[in-house]
Amino acid sequence: MIGVSKLLGGKEKFGDKLRYSKKSKGQQHGALENRGPVVVWNMTRTCNLSCTHCYSDSDYKDYSGELSTAEAKEFIDDLADFNVPVLLFSGGEPLIRDDIFELAEYTAEKGIRPTISTNGTLITKDVAQRLKGIGVGYVGISLDGLEETNDQFRGKEGAFKKALEGIHNCLEIDQKVGLRFTINRHNYQELDQIFDLLEEEQIPRACFYHLVYSGRGSEMVKEDISLEESRKVMDLIIERTLDFQKRGIDKEILTVDNHADGIYLYLKMKQEDPARAEKILELLQRNEGNRTGIAIANVDWLGNVHPDQFTQNHTFGNVRERKFSEIWTDSSQNEILAGLKDRKNLLKGRCSKCKWLGVCNGNFRARAEAIYGDFWHQDPACYLTDEEIGLTKGKVVNK
């Protein structure tokens, strides 16, 4: 994640302490010194919607083999012992599981911050109140465009209205909530209006995800925006974030799954605000870029451990057979996990020669593998020019 609002001088939020602390630099197994990674747990594959870009390829049906409540609690016990700071309950749709409230409360009791990633359509007033009462730190609700666009992606008419109702139900009781928006060719032109929505509805946080080619999303490679359009998207995000800050409107704005964003932000501010740019570079150097396999981990509904939720084709072990903490810290049995801990010498193409490797760390491996069939190849979604990354002068070339 790139904390755009934080880098531009906004107020520090919870996640910034994990991303930009001096204790985050140089870690191999966690977000901070003496801490485990942020863990995304796809606790169920079942979902009441059928989104076209779903990385878990979910449907509204039962899937066998999901971790039981008892197994989940053993898993959470180990995460607590490993000093994991955050457990993100995801899916499918996590609110479909009958034990979601029990497990989220158990997580909070163990000293881990429970957060939830949801499509928001099931968040009634009662559900919102229960989440707040449990101590859920954050609820991220997916909205991938305005009403018509969102409903088309979600595969269900009325999904936008129900999700917005879920956001309102959280806001009414001061349950922290925000938007999750996956950028693609069909919705990026609505981004300006999404910022308007943030202000009109007083939504305090938004995460803008770059498309990752995995699950059903792997079929959307041609639906991604061009490299030039990615730059324009970042220009807009920066412009609107600065506008919020100038007007004293406190919004947490982040981009996700493309670490070129941080470098682009630095280069832009170097021209417009050199003093701010130096602070941005310092924070990016602490973070060290993509930390998949280090500070971010994924466990799926079957208990399999993966580098992140978008890279479920690579499995390191299963929490039914071995503790997560043991799997995560023992890379001797898996070349991919070992490589992710220290990947710089394994990277190929433009990534291997990039002068910003220390603050990007090779960007996103899932996209490289999807396009080139090579986990360590260059990320095709890097929109920085050859000149910007220290190679020969050149223009941005569309994918």
Image: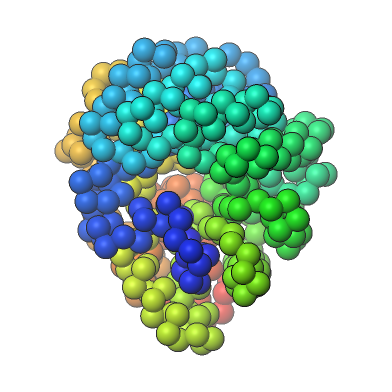
The one of 200 and 297 positioned closer to us in this rendering: 200
The one of 314 and 304 positioned closer to us in this rendering: 304
Query: For residue 114, which quarter of the picture?
Result: top left
Image position of 129 with respect to 23: above or below: above
At 22% across and 51% down in the image, what residue appears?
33
Quadrant occupied by the C terminus: bottom right
Where is residue 321? Give x, y as percent: 26, 18
Where is residue 357? Give x, y as percent: 34, 67
At 45% across and 86% down in the image, what residue appears?
274
At 60% across and 29% down in the image, what residue appears?
129
Where is residue 270? Give x, y as percent: 47, 84
Image position of 208 with respect to 241: above or below: above
Q: Is residue 70 visible?
A: yes
Q: Is residue 55 left or right of residue 36?
A: right
At 58% across and 39% down in the image, what residue appears?
175
Q: Describe the colour scheme in one phrase.
A: rainbow
